[in-house]
Amino acid sequence: DTSLAEVNSFSPSVPISPSSMINQYKFEDEPELRDLFITVDDPESHITAIETFITYRVVTKTSRGEFDSSEYEVRRRYQDFLWLKTKLEEAHPTLIIPPLPEKFIMKGMVERFSDEFIETRRKALHKFLNRIADHPTLTFNEDFKIFLTAQAWELSSHKKQGPGLLSRMGQTVRAVASSVRGGVKNRPEMFTEMNDYMETFSQKINVLDKIAHRIYKEEREYFNEMKEYGPIHTLWSASEEDIADSLKGVASSIDKCCKATEKRMAGLSENLLPILHEYVLYSEILMGVLKRRDQIQGELDSKVDALANRKTEKDQFSEEIGKLEDKVECANNALKADWDRWKRNMQCDMRSAFTNVAENNLRYYEE
Amino acid sequence: VLSFRAVESQSEAQCAPVDSLWRRYSEFELLRNYLSVTYPHIVVPPLPEKRADFVWHKLSADNMDPDFVERRRIGLENFLLRVASHPVLCQDKIFYSFLTQEGGWKEMVNETGFQLKADSRLKALNATFRVKNPDKRFTELKHYSDELQSVISHLLRVRARVADRLYGVYKVHGNYGRVFSEWSAIEKEMGDGLQSAGHHMDVYAASIDDILEEEEHYADQLKEYLFYAEALRAVCRKHELMQYDLEMAAQDLTSKKQQCEELATGTVRTFSLKGMTSKLFGQETPEQREAKIKVLEEQIQEGEEQLKSKNLEGRDFVKSAWADIERFKEQKNHDLKEALISYAVMQISMCKKGIQVWTNAKECFSKM
């Protein structure tokens, strides 16, 4: 049943029972049992009186019963992706929501709508939706389904519903307030370990990102010089008789090396660079998730402290505290499970990314 | 101040083997100048560069750098071997004493008076000495030597830049090692794979130093022929000047003969100031005219003999020069082919090393 009525009654603070999650994530991680396929392609430029923007085509193929049809094709712009991410974060504050590509690129002279920029963004958006589709919990999220299936006007009207701006602001204020108070002092050991891990990981992944970009740059400079190197030998061969063939041979070999270098560079920019960049963003997201968990804990802790000070209104408080305790437990469990999943995926991604780099280099040297 | 030991190895000259002695770079220069002047028709082997040129920036351009000094030593040794294996040059006594005589060699060279034979016009610009009937073969050879010089120097410059960039690619990979190691400290399952992969990245980064050091030898081989092009050009130039002198002498002779004829017959075919003034202010006496004719006839006689010997000299020069040029061509083709082959071998070896390192790295990564 995919009626909008369900969406109206959906409230971000309804806890999801841990047991249902465990059932879901075991089989979702196996690709053969996938039942939702998404592609993001075909960027198109739209020019209106006020602005210019790009939309991307999002094609969904599915065998799931909850979907009315087995195929959907919609057009979405970056704003829409941003909306989806926000909704997912609201619904699942301690789940690891995949990163979106950045709004702007500060470094470099990349024009806002250069082909390279659009292609990089398209690939990242494709990754973003697929990561959600692979996630045992997020894949069943209603807003996600609407994102994939609704026509443009349907999506706009749906966006306007749900908790208004003011109530969302109120949530943020409360969150900030409770974060000031802590949530750190009663933090379970496991999450302190996660925090420490993430701090180091974040450092290292940022450095790796820089190193990989530097290697790409050096390879490009090498390629530029090599382009000039081969033709000199051809020029020389024109003045020679006996050694003309040898010189031409060297020239053609150098040109082959050039082509191999180009392939190697392409391999870097298609595989390693996007992955490292994604994990740079992931490390920020994870720090955010850990903070949010602390905030939820903080809410509980502050209520418990308040109770300790006020002997009256005990019953009302204990009901609230009971709810908060549940909330904290769910948040912790959600995060723990998602953390394990994230780590496994990270390991897998890094392994395949670096193995791919090694293979590219092997191919380069063999050629 | 650097001195080099010249140790005589296999020489074609028959002599008693002598112990080694010390020579400065300037003495090598003196030897070469002497040989160039004494054997103008020979393509004299070049000396290695005085200063480090065409260096890629990681290699020191400092003349005192031990690597540069070593390469220069090899270059000078090579120069002596080239001279020793040359059929004509190896017989030269000054060359022999360079290898054997400790003291007084410099004085000995200067005593030969070779500096007087040196043609200062060799340094002058082309246009000043235009030859009317250039020898086509020498003109073509001069063009070739110019082209060779230009193409090799361009090649060396780009090669240095390519080496620079290649160095950069390899060395940045070295950064992986440290980060992988630090990252592996917080990982449980990935730790070992990362750590060992990092080690291989360090090996990869370090391997470029030897690779580029070897390439310098290739660059030196090309440099020798860059400088040989200069020697080739010098022979062409000397021929040109010889030809020019010949033409000037022939021209001078012709004009003297004409003057003689005019005086004898009394007709003035060519304008001369003397002729005009004598017309205006009265003619010479017959005795004066007779005296002039006699002087001219002597000069013509001398001139004709000189021209004959110059022609002979020219023909000899051309003959022996072309013999040496043919020898040089064969040597050049052989050496350059060998050099190109060794360069290819170097590249293959570099790729093999790369394959080994990345195979190892891949194994480590796949175990992560």
Image (cartoon, helix red, strand yellow):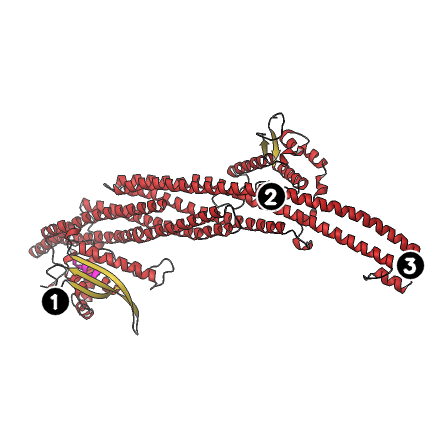
**Residue A157 horizontal side relative to residue A110, left or right:** left
Callouts 1 and 2 close, C-beta under 8 Å = no
Residue A318, label in figure: none
| Residues beneath discs 3 and 1 located on the same chain | no
Residue B293, x across and y down, in percent? 87, 53
Q: Which residue has dot 2 on it?
A: B325
Q: Amino acid at mark 3?
A: Glu
Q: Which residue has dot 3 on it?
A: B284
Instruction: Judge the density around disc 1: few (<14), some (14-19), many (≥20) Cα neighbours within 10 Å.
Output: few
Residue A4, label in figure: 1
Q: Nearer the viewer, mark 1 or mark 2?
A: 2
Q: Nearer the viewer, residue B161 or B36?
A: B36
**Residue in the picture at 58% in, 31% down:** B5
Name the dominant secondary structure of the magenta segment. Answer: helix
Q: Start and end of the magenta stretch?
A: A83-91
Q: Nearer the viewer, residue A223 or B316?
A: B316
Q: Secondary structure at mark 1?
A: helix
Q: Secondary structure at mark 2?
A: helix
Q: Amino acid at mark 2?
A: Ile
Residue A226, x across and y down, in percent? 43, 50
Residue B94, x across and y down, in percent? 67, 34
